[in-house]
Amino acid sequence: MALFGTAFTSSKVVIGQIPHEVAAALRFGGGALVLLLLLSLRPGSVTFAWRDLVRAGSVGLMGVFAYNFFFFWGISLAPAIDGSIIVPVLSPVLTTITLLMTGHEKTSTIQAAGLALGVTGAVVFFIGIGGTGKGVTGSRLAGDFVFLLAAGCWAAYSITSKKVLSGMEPLRATAYATGVGALALTVAAIPSVPRTDWAAVPAATWTNVGFLAVGPTAVAYLFYNQGLRSVSPITATLSMFAVPVFGAVSSVLFLGESITAVQLAGALITIVGAALAVTRGKSTRDAPSG
């Protein structure tokens, strides 16, 4: 969650120099190379199977391609701090609603309390934005709506990944999903490549691209899928309530954005909600399904 949170800040830096479509392709293209390298070096790794590639790749189209297409689009329109609140808070809400409506999961009282606290903290945090002196513009509202679409994609990714991980090791599943998603992002970025002034891209931007590829992509996605293999999609996405805290801290430190007392209070409420939800998630109900 720490790596996911810092991704919003780092991505904001990158799209200041590179079109958002190209930035997404570079991030996940690099991440895919790292994961595929790790997979090739893994001792005793099973042989390639087209069935595994199709299963994991289809999930990657949702959680890597669609999610990050909207993620980088939203970052180009709205402040990074908006995305660090909207996406991680609405993802568990949408995941929980979907699984409860389909009868696949049952939530406990403590998990429900954690969910409610997380949403409350995010609302308080968002209200606090008004104290930073940043106005609400049409571009910002459009960006926030795009972040809503990204949240829906992440919820769908978490639900479908659980099924894939029941029959595939996390490293292989993550590598295949990221590779297919990165390929789709590259195709989508082709029209934007000619208008990218590569010579003018500063070294700091390339440093951020490298960080995004390794940290918030290769490592974070792998850790997320490793955890998702052992807990329910609800618990996995509920842990994302911690992302706004890391996103806010990194935005303040690296983008010079300010945080108000109201936002700090919202962040603390969010932490409590995440702790309650994740602690309850360590029950037998979250054991891996067959």
Image (tube, helix red, strand yellow):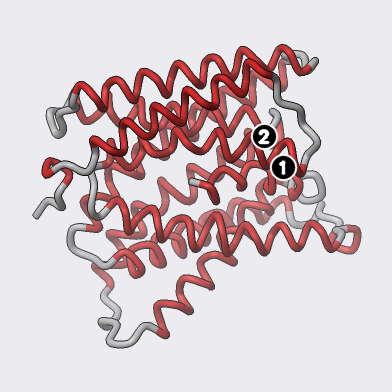
In the rendered image, the residue lying farthest to the right is 200
Q: Earlier in the sequence, mark 2 or mark 1?
A: 1
The three-letter code of the residue at mark 1 reads Lys
- x%, y% of residue 48? 30, 79
Residue at the location (51% across, 21% down)?
122
Report the disc number at residue 12: 1
Structural crowding at the residue carrying mark 2, measured as other residues with C-alpha within 10 Å and reported as few (<14), some (14–19) or many (≥20): many
> Could you say where residue 78 lies in the image, as x and y percent from the top left?
69, 28
**Which residue is drawn at the image coordinates 31% and 38% (left, top)?**
278
Front residue (pair 90, 32) = 90
Pointer 2: what residue?
Answer: 80
Marks 2 and 1 close (CB-CB < 8 Å): yes
Q: Is residue 285 left or right of residue 144?
A: left
Q: Residues within 10 Å of mark 1 (few under 14, many from 20)?
A: many
- Residue 20, x across and y down, in percent: 69, 45
Quarter of the image with the C terminus in it: bottom left
Dividing the picture into quarters, in which one does residue 276 lie? top left
SS under mark 2: helix
Q: Residue at x 12, y 51 (%)?
A: 289
Q: Is residue 8 above or below residue 107?
A: below
Q: Is residue 123 left or right of residue 6?
A: left
Distance in Å between CA atoms under marks 2 and 1: 6 Å
Q: On the image, which quarter does residue 176 sit in?
A: bottom left
